[in-house]
Amino acid sequence: MTSHSDELAARFTPDRANGRTRPLATDVPVTVSFEFFPPTDPEMERTLWDTVRRLAPLAPRFVSVTYGADGSTRDRTLDVVRRLRSDTALTIAPHVTSIGSTREELLDLARQYWTSGIRHLVALRGDLPASAQNRTSASASFVWGLDLVRGLRSVADFDISVAAYPEVHPEARSARDDLDNLKRKIDAGATRAITQFFFDNDAYLRFRDDCAAAGIEAPIVPGILPITRFSQIQRFARRCGATIPDWIVKRFEGLDEDVETRRLLGAAVALEQVEHLQRHGVREFHFYTLNRAELTYAICHALGLRYRHIAPT
Ligand code: FAD
């Protein structure tokens, strides 16, 4: 009978040979990026800036700031971007979503970003509001992520990241259609795809192979969501169609009131996940930090990233 820990090892380390786990290729440097969201109250604001201070010395390739699908966070996103620009030396990639804004508003926003020195953007369609009758009425102009990529490229030579879905976007007509959509976004000038979060590494690795077979050469950067509050993650996963394997569900059973144990297990799960991906040649990771530093910092440390002293400006 296999023990639970054997099952876990088999889940994330199918490349074990002769009972020994292959060593990590930690000599190959890893690159990371971090996602933040605009805070809504003073306490969240403090948490965000504590998190930025903690993670910045890990020298991420960029940090991204989310944008409400209906334009609702526009001002708060801009505030965070401004402060990141003034207080840090980080490369910033604001998210831009097309739903809920007109074509001209988005092109204007892109021009403002370019003028203020922003060179990276994450281009997304955004989720349809529940009340949307159809896609066209929900978006006055750019209907799909692809249209937005084309629009942003028409403004300036931005470095554009787009979304990708190892477990297929819930609205896609088929996995093939979804992959073709990603290829069109890359062919239109996006430079990298960041995936929706996932816990099934096999799904990601298959998707990466499918992308390569479809001629997509841009990096498919895995989006890693360290689990802190499991019930929240289950909600997110239901919404975006991410599978949570049974062994992860079992790990978090009965821990609703036990923050400390949840945190330890969350770190362990994310660590196993990134180490397995690293063994499969992944060298770049995007972390959905949920504006919390602890788990992301610990995982990055394990990936070989070290605190770099950054002299105050
Ligand atoms: P698209 O690329 O337009 O694809 C959406 C769906 O439409 C897919 O199913 C695709 O296959 C299908 N499709 C595309 N073109 C066509 C066509 N011509 N005909 C029929 N079907 C088509 N949301 C936010 O609101 N704010 C954020 O800041 C944000 N950040 C994100 C960051 C990342 C890394 C990721 C992965 C997602 C993020 N999201 C965010 C969520 C994202 O907006 C949603 O997943 C959204 O539903 C799809 O956005 P997209 O850019 O992938 O859309």
Image: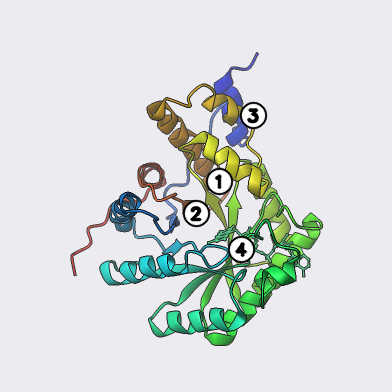
Residue 126, labelled with which disc? 4
**Residue at image location 63% in from the left, 59% down from the top:** 127
Q: CA distance from mark 2 to mark 4?
A: 22 Å
Q: Mark 3 packing: few (<14 Cα in 10 Å), some, or many (20+)?
A: few
Disc 4 under 8 Å from ligand 1? The reply is yes
Q: Mark 2 packing: few (<14 Cα in 10 Å), some, or many (20+)?
A: many
**Residue at image location 62% in from the left, 75% down from the top:** 148
Residue 246, labelled with which disc? 3
Q: Which residue is mark 1?
A: 277
> x and y percent of residue 30 in the render?
44, 54
**Residue at image location 36% in from the left, 68% down from the top:** 79
Describe the element under mark 4 as helix, strand or loop.
loop
Residue extending farthest top: 1
**145 or 251, nearer to the observer:** 145
Q: Which residue is mark 2?
A: 285
Q: Which three-letter amino acid code belongs to the residue tagged 3? A: Asp
**43 or 131, nearer to the observer:** 131
Q: Which three-letter amino acid code belongs to the residue tagged 4? A: Gly
Image colouring: rainbow
Q: CA distance from mark 4 to mark 1?
A: 28 Å
Q: Which three-letter amino acid code belongs to the residue tagged 1? A: Leu
Q: Mark 4 packing: few (<14 Cα in 10 Å), some, or many (20+)?
A: many
**250 or 2, nearer to the observer:** 250
Q: CA distance from mark 1 to mark 2?
A: 9 Å
Q: CA distance from mark 1 to mark 3?
A: 20 Å
